[in-house]
Amino acid sequence: MVTIESKHQQENGMIELNQKLTNIIDAANLNSFGIRAIMANPKTGVATNYSAGDALPNSHTWVDGETTAEELTGTSALSIDYDGWDVSNIEDSIEQLAPYIDSDTQIVLIGGGESYEGNDPSETVISNAIVLYVF
C-alpha cells in the first residue's frame, strides 16, 4: 500500500537523485547523456560489471529481438534531458528499463561526445561513451 508518507519519501529520493546526477553531469563536461541497462551477454550469459570512468563498447543493431553483427557508431541508451541546470526524465527512463532488469543487470548513467537519435523511442546513440555513475 502506498501511503502519503511513502509517496513523499519517493519524491524526495528522486529530487536527491536528480541533484546528484546534475552534479555528475556538470562535472563531466560532455555533450550527451543517457541511462543504459547493461545485461549479461545473451550468447555467453556472462555479465560485465562497469565502474564510473569505464569506456563502453559500441552497441549493435537488433532485429526482431536478436543482436546482429552490425555495429553502431556509439553506445545505445535512453536519452535524458539536461538543460545546463537540471536533469529531467530520469524516473521515466528508469521505468522504461524495468522490463529488462534482472539480478545481473547494471543500470548506469553514461556520457560522451556527439549523439544521434536511435530507432527506438527515447533512444540515443552516444559516441565515445563512458560510465559516469552506477545506480
Image (spheres, rainbow, N blue to C red):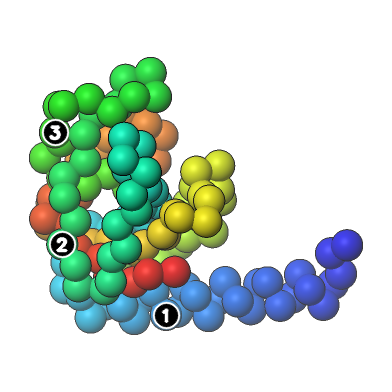
Q: Provide the residue designation for mark 3.
A: 71
Give neighbour class at mark 1: few <14, some 14-19, many 20+ (Cα, 10 Å): some
Percent coordinates x, y for residue 12 in the rendering? 63, 78
Q: Is residue 74 left or right of residue 12?
A: left
Q: Residue at x 51, y 50 (%)?
A: 101
Give the spatial CA distance, label 3 vs label 1.
Answer: 32 Å
Picture residue at 37% right of the left edge, 31% below the top: 120
Disc nearer the start of the sequence (3/2):
2
In the image, what residue occupies the spot 53% across and 80% down? 16
Asked which secondary structure carries label 2, the reply is loop
Task: Report whether 131 appears left or right of 9.
Answer: left
Closest to the observer, 129 or 39: 39
The disc at residue 20 is 1
Residue 130: x, y in percent?
19, 63
**Residue at x-position 78% and y-position 73%:** 6
* Residue highlighted by disc 2: 55
Q: Nearer the viewer, residue 125 or 26?
A: 125
**Mark 2: amino acid:** Ala
Label 3 sits on what residue type?
Answer: Glu
Locate the C terminus and report the quarter of the image it occupies: bottom left
